Amino acid sequence: AYAMPYAEALLYLPHTDSGHFVSDGAIPFVQMVLDGLRGYSVPAVNYAADPHVMLLHAVESNSALAYSVMGASYEEVARTSMNSLYASDYAQWKDAILAAEQELMQVREKTGGSAIADYAFLDKELRRVTFTNGAQLMVNYGAVSRTVDGTTVAAKSYVFVEGEGAQ
């Protein structure tokens, strides 16, 4: 009865667009379709150019965080064919993983586990996401804080907008 009977979760879903000049930006379309049907995650946070920006992508797309970690230290694989695991040392990421998961849990408390109902570009760097429970948040990918409709969103941050579902 499910559209994807063999998939329990989808990992490392894309969060960017093609980057072609005709594109204004990426919307989390696949995530919006899957929301409530299957779990899904952003690409491995520890391999992102900016792990905090990857957290922003998870917040705006209602995605889980994903990490690719190992128990060995990088020094043990540095000069081997596994050299590509340069960012996988769990001991180095443990505290960051716990902090990011805690932050994402706080977001989920406000969204109440509800799906994305609406997604809007306010401009190239600022997005507004509305959830089915009425909670709204604005995500700012820009390098400076922005104020829209009386709500200020710090640079590379997000804020919940007061409204029906906001807590």
Image (spheres, rainbow, N blue to C red):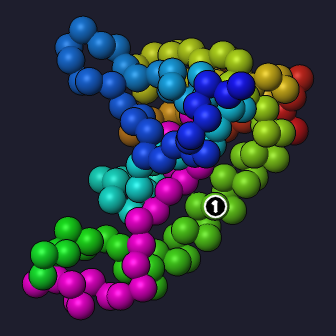
* Residue linked to disc 1: 101
Q: Residue at x 51, y 16 (%)?
A: 121
- Residue 34 lies, in percent from the top left, at 61, 29
Residue 59 visible (yes or no): no
Q: Residue at x 61, y 45 (%)?
A: 8
* Label 1 CA crowd tier, 10 Å (few <14, some 14–19, many 20+): some
In this view, 54 is above or below 81: above
Q: In the figure, is residue 87 to the left or right of 65?
A: left
Query: What amino acid type should be assigned to the residue bearing mark 1?
Result: Glu
Residue 48 visible (yes or no): yes
Q: Nearer the viewer, residue 108 or 69?
A: 69
In this view, 62 is above or below 2: below
Q: Residue at x 24, y 8 (%)?
A: 22
Q: In the figure, is residue 121 to the left or right of 35?
A: left
Q: Quadrant of the N terminus?
A: top right
Q: Nearer the viewer, residue 31 or 103?
A: 31
Q: Quadrant of the C terminus?
A: top right
Magenta stretch, main secondary structure, is loop
- Residue 132 lies, in percent from the top left, at 79, 22
- Residue 13 lies, in percent from the top left, at 44, 39
The stretch drawn in magenta includes residue 74 = yes
The residue positioned farthest toward the top in the image shown: 22
In this view, 36 is above or below 94: above
In this view, 29 is above or below 13: above
Q: Nearer the viewer, residue 122 or 40?
A: 40
- Residue 131 lies, in percent from the top left, at 74, 25
Q: Nearer the viewer, residue 59 or 115?
A: 115
Picture quadrant where residue 17 is located: top left
Q: In the figure, is residue 112 to the left or right of 158?
A: right
Q: Secondary structure at mark 1?
A: helix
Q: Which residues are magenta?
A: 55-79
